[in-house]
Image (cartoon, rainbow, N blue to C red):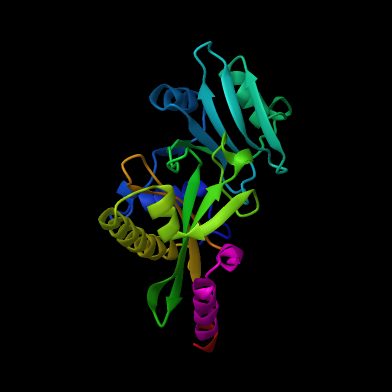
Amino acid sequence: MSDLLGKWEQNLLLQNNPLTSKWIPETTNYTIKDLSNFLNCYDYVYVKHNTSGQGRAIFKIHKQKDGQYCFNGYTIQGEPINKCVATIKDFHEFLHPLEKFGRLSGNYIIQEGIKSLTHSGQPFCIRVHVQKLKGEWVIGGINGKIGKTETKDNGIINSKRAVQVISIDELLSLHSQITEKKKKEVIKHLEEISIAAAEVISTQYPCREYGIDFGLNQNGKPILFEVNTTPGINGFGQMENKSMWKRIVEIRKLQSEN
């Protein structure tokens, strides 16, 4: 068992399981060649550091009609960045500034960009908190996070950044404007995929709880972005209705008793 579950290792586990493989975005290990191929297939892609957290070292990149490569996101230090470079090699040198001295800045993955947007065009993601209680995986809570102005361009939604945390009902009904029937279907899928993902990840990285992040593509299909092995619950505490936060805390107490 690895001490740290990297994004690539996580992807392999989810990709190799039929219960989760159809719900994840296309992902590959970063190389210049693969980045070029992905940019020819998708409007934009994300390049993510394999082991970073809290939105650090994640970049949204696209190729403009004039041939420039434009990217924005957050550096490994967590500083915002938004720039364009002439060639894909220039972007590579930005990722690995010390490569000429034989040092790489860690491994990266490339991930298909998913347009997970509200009706008004704001990026959003969904967090499902899964917990293990008496040998069974249960859903502790689900919420939605909508990116505020500064996240609109890069689409990186993280509790450490400018986000509004709302209920899943409000996100789907008001901000995504989907029907009641479709909303119930989406929530059912989110719960089922989250429990399947917890079962898959726990085979190699056993934890008592996971925070699982999703987007919805333009057809309303849930897309599993990432499984967090040390999930915080502050987002649930920010919601007007504190019932899910209380439920997660109560389950944690029961876990400790067991």
- The answer to whether residue 107 is seen in the rendering is no
Residue 64 on image: x %, y %: 52, 17
Taking the view exactly as shown, the residue that stands out farthest to the top is 66
- The answer to whether residue 218 is seen in the rendering is yes
Please check the rendered image and state whether residue 249 is part of the magenta-colored stretch, yes or no.
yes
For image coordinates 32% across by 47% down, the residue present is 221
Residue 21 on image: x %, y %: 32, 49
For image coordinates 53% across by 55% down, the residue present is 5
The number of numbered discs placed on residues in the rendered structure image is 0
Image: 222 above or below 184: above
Image: 246 above or below 196: below
Image: 218 above or below 54: above
Taking the view exactly as shown, the residue that stands out farthest to the bottom is 257
Relative to 58, 81 lies left or right = right
For image coordinates 64% across by 49% down, the residue present is 161
Relative to 177, 18 lies left or right = left
Query: Nearest the camera: 32 or 209?
Result: 209
Q: What residue range appears in magenta?
A: 231-254
Q: Of helix, strand and loop, which mostly describes the magenta segment?
A: helix
Residue 231 on image: x %, y %: 56, 63
Query: Nearest the camera: 109 or 181?
Result: 181
Taking the view exactly as shown, the residue that stands out farthest to the left is 181
Query: Nearest the camera: 207 or 104?
Result: 207
Relative to 30, 22 lies left or right = left
Please check the rendered image and state whether residue 43 is part of the magenta-colored stretch, yes or no.
no
Image: 126 above or below 118: below
For image coordinates 40% across by 47% down, the residue present is 176
Residue 238 on image: x %, y %: 60, 64
